[in-house]
Image (tube, rainbow, N blue to C red):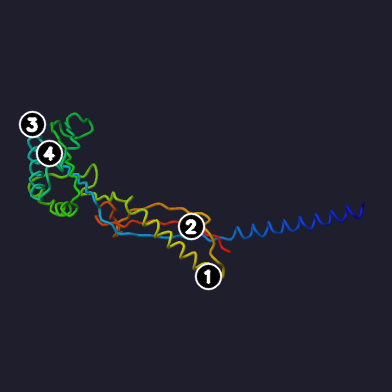
């Protein structure tokens, strides 16, 4: 009986050792993977322009300030019409009236003065037309319009809204780029590329095409869309 028990115990130990050995081999194989990044970039053009034109008019009386504001508004609308921008593309978005004598912190020597600030928002999908008009905005200043940029950019903001249309193709490009890098790594490591272990699509970025100092993405009608996908592949 003792001999049989010893024999059974010995066989069990051998089987256990074999199982443990196989388990460690699988663990080491499963841990062999490579992490790579795939990049996809595409140059796109803006499809919407937002141009807030803010102007200021002053007067010793409210009616005087209103007259100047009306004159400036008419001059702006005439300018936009001359630039072939339809009147329906323009809307009033902000109107502020300030009585300087009501502000105890402003030095006005007791003189009453009214300030009217108004913003006309131009919204258009005709990017080239807006660009052309923005380059000629000095004509408004020459006509006596006092422009202000206190509440935002002084020029148009160009937006790209069709990101969802190009996402699938760009993700496919980034994934293919990542797999190519992984295959090269596997070849250099004298291994075979296995299946997909994990994937992260990455964040899409809309960047200025020309990334010069002080130039924001919204100021450029032509942009670069970029995505970096992180992918892990098993190696065997």
| Residue drawn 39% across the image and 60% down it | 173
| CA–CA distance in space, label 3 to label 2 | 67 Å
Q: Residue 49 appears at what percent x and percent y?
A: 22, 49
Comes first in the chain, label 2 or label 1:
1
| CA–CA distance in space, label 2 to label 4 | 58 Å
Q: Residue 151 appears at what percent x and percent y?
A: 24, 42
Q: Quadrant of residue 56?
A: top left
Horizontally, is 155 left or right of 206 in the view?
left
141 relative to 92, above or below: below
226 relative to 91, above or below: below
| CA–CA distance in space, label 3 to label 4 | 11 Å
Label ID, residue 231: 2
> Disc 1 vs disc 3: which is toward the camera?
1
Label ID, residue 187: 1
| CA–CA distance in space, label 1 to label 4 | 71 Å
Label ID, residue 170: none
86 relative to 221, above or below: above
Horizontally, is 28 left or right of 202 in the view?
right
> Disc 1 vs disc 4: which is toward the camera?
1
Q: Quadrant of residue 27?
A: bottom right
Label ID, residue 57: 4
Query: Which is more toward the observer, 18 or 114?
Result: 18
Comes first in the chain, label 3 or label 4:
4
Comes first in the chain, label 1 or label 3:
3
Q: Which residue is mark 3?
A: 63
Horizontally, is 121 left or right of 217 in the view?
left
Q: Residue 53 appears at what percent x and percent y?
A: 17, 44
Comes first in the chain, label 3 or label 2:
3
């Amino acid at each position: 009986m003792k001999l049989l028990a010893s024999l059974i115990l010995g066989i069990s130990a051998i089987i256990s050792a074999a199982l443990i050995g196989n388990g460690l081999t699988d663990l080491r194989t499963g841990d062999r993977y490579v992490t790579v990044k795939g990049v996809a970039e595409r140059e796109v053009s803006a499809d919407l322009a937002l141009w807030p034109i803010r102007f200021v008019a002053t007067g010793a009386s409210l009616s005087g300030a209103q007259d100047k504001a009306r004159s400036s508004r008419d001059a702006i609308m005439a300018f936009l019409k001359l630039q072939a921008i339809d009147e329906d593309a323009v809307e009033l978005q902000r109107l502020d009236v300030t009585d300087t004598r009501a502000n105890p912190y402003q030095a006005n020597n007791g003189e009453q003065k009214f300030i009217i600030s108004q913003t006309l928002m131009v919204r258009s999908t005709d990017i080239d037309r807006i660009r052309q008009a923005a380059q000629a905005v000095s004509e408004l200043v020459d006509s006596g319009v006092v422009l202000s940029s206190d509440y935002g950019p002084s020029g148009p903001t160009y937006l790209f809204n069709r990101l969802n249309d190009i996402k699938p193709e760009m993700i496919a490009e980034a994934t293919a780029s990542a797999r190519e890098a992984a295959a090269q790594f596997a070849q250099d490591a004298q291994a075979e590329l296995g299946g997909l272990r994990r994937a992260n699509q990455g964040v899409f970025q809309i960047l200025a095409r020309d990334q010069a100092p002080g130039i924001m993405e919204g100021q450029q009608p032509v942009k670069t869309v970029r995505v970096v996908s992180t992918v892990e592949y098993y190696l065997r």
